[in-house]
Image (cartoon, rainbow, N blue to C red):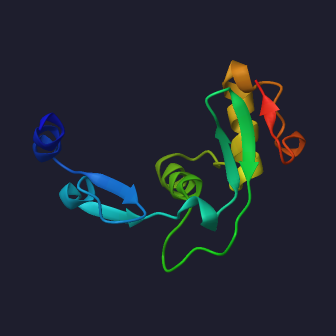
Amino acid sequence: TLAERALRACEFVVVQDIRMTETARYADLLLPACPFTEYEGTFTNWERRVQRFWQAHPPQGEAKPDWQVFAELWLRMQRQTPPFNTREVAAEIARLVPAFAGCAYEQLGEHGVRL
């Protein structure tokens, strides 16, 4: 497939996933990810509603939430301090993405906020 040819052509492939996938088989570096039940955060659904979800249990093994992996990479690549929790990530998104400007993490509640 086109995706397989593209992955084979890459000099170095990094994959972060919760399980061994076809894409992960091409990885030079495979990072363990957490399923959504192992961290808190937000998602935006098809009706543009930002909704919050809560951690059901702690991460297993060496897995880390996506935001934490990216924060650690950011810290190693830049001198600027990255966001270090879901509230800080949400605040950064609200600051940088106009559609999220009025969306405060604390206001999401159980039903979320429509953008």
Residue occupying the point 64% across, 75% down: 58
Tell me: 88 left or right of 39: right
Tell me: 99 left or right of 10: right
Question: How many marks do you count on the picture?
Answer: 0
Q: Position of residue 89 (x, y in %)?
A: 69, 45
Viewer-closest of 95 and 74? 95
Tell me: 72 left or right of 31: right
Does residue 113 lie above or below 76 as drawn? above
Q: Position of residue 48 (x, y in %)?
A: 68, 27
Question: For the N terminus, which image quadrant?
Answer: top left
Viewer-closest of 1 and 33? 1
Does residue 46 lie above or below 70 as drawn? above
Residue occupying the point 49% across, 80% down: 61
Does residue 78 lie above or below 19 as drawn? above
Viewer-closest of 101 and 107? 107
Q: Position of residue 76 (x, y in %)?
A: 49, 55
Tell me: 19 left or right of 88: left
Residue occupying the point 83% across, 25% down: 102
Q: Position of residue 52 (x, y in %)?
A: 75, 48
Question: Furthest-bottom residue in view?
Answer: 61
Does residue 95 lie above or below 51 as drawn? above
Question: Furthest-top residue in view?
Answer: 98
Residue occupying the point 14% across, 34% down: 2
Question: For the C terminus, which image quadrant?
Answer: top right
Asked where in the image residue 107 lies, by quadrant, the reply is: top right
